[in-house]
Image (spheres, rainbow, N blue to C red):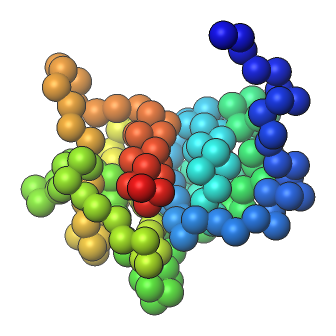
Amino acid sequence: MRKLKNEELGRLSVDEYKAEEKRPIVVVLDNVRSMHNVGSAFRTADAFRIERIYLCGITAKPPHRDINKTALGATESVAWTHREKTKEVVDELREADYKIICVEQADESVPLQDFMPYRDSKYCLIFGNEVFGVEEEVVADADTCLEIPQFGTKHSLNVSVSIGIVMWDFFKKLED
């Protein structure tokens, strides 16, 4: 066994990526304060070829050195939009027939492993602030809240880790 060289990976160029069909998934970052988490979201979005990232509220936007350090160029491949109000984005996406899903611990949340996305649906996945989570009015208006089960002493995962787990889960379930 040997590690593959970058040129053996068959990766798309930025232009090829932009021309490819995207998965009907958008990610909304609701007041995510860490630029490293924002960069990681871009990199994960690129890996799973999602439609767009919405950067809402205080979430930093490219170009920025700290975002670029983690994104490794994904800010050039993944479409993104900055908006002040998360709720306005959610309302627009609902009008466009996206299923609104918060990744949050809520009284009626569904364990991630029990959720089955439909291939013919479009999804908006909302990830919240590192301390306060997704805004309460957005949670109240969601179609579903997904919760990643945890079994240790901590009450949450880093938002970039949560994005990776949820995106992989969606990818796996939609590709099977």
Residue 31: image location, x then y, percent: 49, 52
Residue 45: tell me if it is visible.
no
Along the horizontal axis of the image, is 160 left or right of 5? left
> 118 or 154, which is in the foreground?
118
Residue 75: image location, x then y, percent: 76, 49
Q: Residue furthest top?
A: 1
Residue 32: image location, x then y, percent: 50, 46
> 46 or 1, which is in the foreground?
1
Q: How many marks?
A: 0
Along the horizontal axis of the image, is 115 left or right of 45? left
Q: Residue furthest bottom?
A: 95
The correct choice, above or below, for 173 with respect to 120 in the image is above
Q: Which quadrant does the C terminus fall into?
A: bottom left
Q: Which quadrant does the N terminus fall into?
A: top right
> 60 or 28, which is in the foreground?
28
Q: Residue furthest left?
A: 107
Residue 8: tell me if it is visible.
yes
The correct choice, above or below, for 6 with respect to 174 in the image is above
In the image, what residue occupies the spot 43% across and 71% down? 119
In the image, what residue occupies the spot 64% across and 45% down? 47
